[in-house]
Amino acid sequence: MTPTQGALDLAETIEVLACLDYQEGELQAFLDRVARGFSRVLGVDWTVVTLVEDLRTYRVAGNSSSAWDQGEEAIALHGSVTARVIDGGTPYWVADAREQAQDVAMPEGFVAYLGVPLKTASGDVIGTVCSFGRAARDFDNKDVAVARVFAARAAAAIEQYRTTLALAAHNEQLEQAVEHRTSELRAAQQRLIRRERLAAIGELSSKIVHEVRSPLSTITMALDHLNQVDLPESFSRRLALAREDVARLNRLLGEILSYAAPGTGSREWVDVNALVARTVDAYNDALGTANDTRPVRCRCSSDHPGVLANPDKLRQVLINLLDNAVDASPVGAEVVVETRTSDDQRLVSIRVRNRSTQGRLDANRALEPFFSTKPQGTGLGLAIVAGIVEAHQGRFSIDQDEDDDVIAKVTLPISAKGAGEWPIAANG
């Protein structure tokens, strides 16, 4: 065989190889250096490093010359010289494609070819180092040996790069998992603290309510008796105010007990859409009697998600949210109630949306007990809602979007019909 024209001697070859040490960073830049170094050492016109995309295509990952840039697009393997190297897993060369008995697909203008496979440490072929010459060229064993060295450098760099990417992706997944788990633990801790606080408040509230209700009952009986007596008009007005205050105190005591011990009572399978539709209809009927209006509109999902819940408690949740929404909405504005099922069919949400006239919502304080923006509000409505929803293993949130619409959202786990009905302790 004739000696390679333009090829470097051993010392120069070693010098080129010494510069090809991949550390980290951009893989393509390193593979371009491999291709240029290979072209320089063997004295060939063009060298590319290819990577197999799938069983049918490959792409150029390293290029010795921008004059023959192949871009990022996938190239068909079938019939190509690259396919011969990949399929055989061994070096393949062509001295002069014009003299080959069988058809060999070569890039236009090139007749000589030398290709060696890129192999991983486990022996898998992941691509090739391919060199093309414009003139006929007899490649010898020395050329093939040098080509193998360059291929080994390229394969090692590709493996290192892919391992780095896989490690980075794995680390990111771990970080996300840790963050998610930390968030879950933080939420669980907050729920535990809330339950402990509720237990303490519940015990204290029960005693206070009992102590207050006893004299309040006596006061109520006395006021009821006075109400049957013919009194002067000024006394009657004062009596009416006293009866209203007693009724308000009774409602407040009831709300305090509901907040302190939300519970679920006995649970059964509940069709969420049916419960929402009936509650909204009854709510509109009650308002319509007073002012001939139906301000609440219902948009239920097309399916019929069910939950294991206490229907009376869910009705209480929805009515509380509707009261808040209607009170906070401009006159004549609609309140929309909608139900949605999650993509994985595991959760159902009930959303109450209204346009607010009370400025920006303080979402952080909205669920605090005894916090209210209403002059006559107790500040327990949303806190009671949150307690009932949590007792049903659900989540409650309230927020305001960029259009100033307030969205109260109840999310509950879906249960199959007939999954079971059982009584639950009052504390949930």
Image: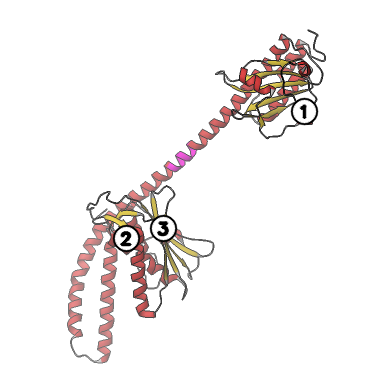
Q: Which colour scheme is used?
A: secondary structure
- C-alpha gap between disc 2 and disc 3: 20 Å
Residue 214 rendering spot, x and y as whole percentages? 18, 70
Q: Residue at image x 76%, y 18%?
A: 97
Q: State which region is magenta.
A: 174-180
Residue 304, quarter of the rendered image: bottom left
**At 41% from the left edge and 58% from the top edge, which residue is drawn?**
302
* Rendered image quadrant of residue 312: bottom left
Kindly identify the amino acid type of the residue bearing the numbered disc 2. Leu
Graded by Cα atoms within 10 Å as few (under 14), some (14 to 19) or many (20 or more), the crowding at tag 3 reads few
> Which residue is labeled 1 in the image?
65
Looking at the rendered image, the disc whose residue lies closer to the viewer, 2 or 1, is 1
Report helix, strand or loop for mark 3. loop
Residue 302: which disc?
3
Q: Is residue 49 visible?
A: yes
Kindly identify the amino acid type of the residue bearing the numbered disc 3. Ser
From the viewer's perspective, is residue 185 above or below residue 301? above
Is 85 included in the stretch rendered in magenta? no
